[in-house]
Image (cartoon, rainbow, N blue to C red):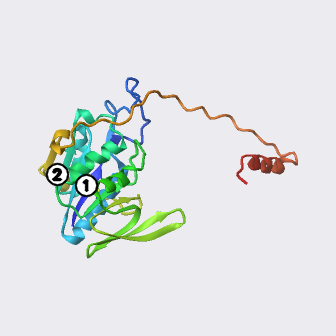
Amino acid sequence: MNVVVCVKQVPDPNSAGQLDPATNRLKREGVEVVLDPGDEYGIEAGLQLAEASGGQVTVVSMGPEKALDAIRKALAMGAAKGVLVSDAALAGADALTTAKVLAAAIRREPFDLVITATESTDASTGVVPQMLAGLLDVPCVTFAKHVEASGGTLKVNRQTEAGYDVVEADLPALMSVTAGVFEPRYPSLKGIMAAKSKPVDRLGVADLGLGEVTSGEQIVGVQPAEERKAGEIVEDDGTAAQRIVDFLAAQKVI
């Protein structure tokens, strides 16, 4: 099974995000950047499926040259090769542009399964997997918490608010995974050393035959969120319970 896993380098989610005052976009230079934690689960899922079928994993990323570090971590975990699409024209790309670029990069070689996270931790749009599946013209199964693949069929436990649905799709397909799908492995020293010699294709927009690429959106302004207002302290003078009930009713909670 040939598995493609989409990965992204993002500002460290454990640090407070900063906006570039010149562009109103998330600052990515001069801050700590890491492989998106959600992508580690996708890499692990891909590795386990490929190992069970004798296949291999290719990781694909779109970003600046520094995004190669995220690809190298995936290679150290066990992926066989990487693809980095890096082009100044892609700075600030929106979700649809991102999906178009990733789809063009993925189409370069045959694949059985494409795996993504449910959403990135920096943009959090949650729409790229579905867009990508549409552009690749393959079935899309989202929020996978358990996955099996055999005989050309993908079987997934799809997480829902009430539990999970069992969903099947013919391969090739695209699947987005949740944090509960598999526990990501740690790169071993051997894996880290081997990653240095694994192939990574570096591509630009021209290599993908997409023509002129634009972000499709423009951020015209940013305003700080309103500060949280002080709450009301209810002292129990015998009417506290009723006052709380009345408040909840006014907020349409009950």
- Residue 185 in view, yes or no: no
Q: Secondary structure at mark 2?
A: helix
- Give x and y (percent) for residue 213: 26, 37
Q: Which disc, if any, is residue 195?
A: 2
Give the residue at the far top of this rendering: 22
Front-most of 156 and 127?
127
Which residue sits at x=31%, y=58%? Answer: 115
x, y percentage for residue 221? Answer: 46, 27
Instruction: Name the residue rendered at 28%, 59% in the picture.
Output: 114
Q: Is residue 240 above or below residue 183?
A: above
Furthest toward the right, the residue is 238
- Is mark 2 in CB contact (under 8 Å) with mark 1? yes
Residue at the farthest bottom position: 151
Q: Nearer the viewer, residue 49 or 222?
A: 222
Q: Where in the figure is residue 95, as x and y percent of width and height?
A: 36, 44
Pinpoint residue 220: horizontal percent, then vertical percent.
44, 27
Q: Please tell me in which quadrant of the rendered image residue 85 appears.
A: top left
Q: Residue at x 28, y 68 (%)?
A: 171
Q: Which residue is found at the position 26% from the left and 76% from the top?
A: 151
Q: Assess disc 2: are there few (<14), some (14-19) or many (≥20) residues with their C-alpha within 10 Å of its C-alpha.
A: many
| Quadrant of the image containing the N terminus | bottom left
Examine the rendering and report whether any part of residue 247 can be seen.
yes
Vertical placement of residue 120 versus 48, above or below: above
The amino acid type found where label 1 is placed reads Pro
The C terminus sits in image quarter = bottom right
Identified by mark 2, the residue type is Ala
Of the image marks 2 and 1, the number of the one nearer the N terminus:
1
- Horizontal relation, residue 53 to residue 164: left or right: left
Q: Which residue is mark 1?
A: 187
Q: CA distance from mark 2 to mark 1?
A: 10 Å
Q: Residues within 10 Å of mark 1 (few under 14, many from 20)?
A: some
Q: Secondary structure at mark 1?
A: loop
